[in-house]
Image (cartoon, helix red, strand yellow):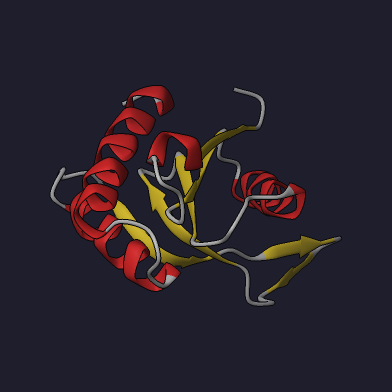
Amino acid sequence: MHENELSKLVFNAALKVHQHLGPGLLESAYEECLFYELCKTGLMVQKQKPLPLFYEDVRLEIGYRVDIMIENKLIIEVKAVDALNDVHLAQVLTYLKLSGCKLGLLINFNVTLIKNGVKRVVNNL
């Protein structure tokens, strides 16, 4: 399945979670519920996937973790903040570069309308 098709599934799952829970909860609650919804799709969904950093010829396990990865193609970074800012976008772009994925979704659940909380981040898509 192409990244854009995957992103539609993710948006619909995020919409369902947001409609059920609303804003104001902890990030971990949204991440767990979104993971649950995505697992129901039958796709390969990984939560808190470790992401190593390679420096020269050395593999460094320094604690980077992707919130959710789908089919090793799409990264989802879940937030529950007042507003997304440049450092959040930079985080997703870094994860895309380290993983080789082309598309990431930065989803902030602390919004009135979930469509206002979703940002697409691309890396050579």
Which percent across, then down, holds residue 116?
48, 36
Which percent across, then down, holds residue 114?
39, 41
Name the residue rendered at 32%, 39% in the picture: 10
Name the residue rendered at 33%, 70% in the picture: 29
Quarter of the picture containing the N terminus is: top left
Viewer-closest of 58 and 77: 77
Viewer-closest of 80 and 57: 80
Question: Count of labels shown?
Answer: 0
Name the residue rendered at 36%, 63% in the picture: 31
Q: Quadrant of residue 34?
A: bottom left
Q: Is residue 34 left or right of residue 90?
A: left
Which percent across, then down, holds residue 67?
46, 62
Q: Is residue 85 left or right of residue 78?
A: right
Q: Residue furthest right?
A: 56
Name the residue rendered at 41%, 23% in the picture: 4
Which percent across, then down, holds residue 54?
75, 61
Q: Is residue 103 left or right of residue 22?
A: right
Vertical side of 100 occupied by 23: above or below: below
Q: Residue furthest bottom?
A: 62
Vertical side of 122 occupied by 94: above or below: below
Viewer-closest of 118 and 5: 118
Quarter of the picture containing the C terminus is: top right
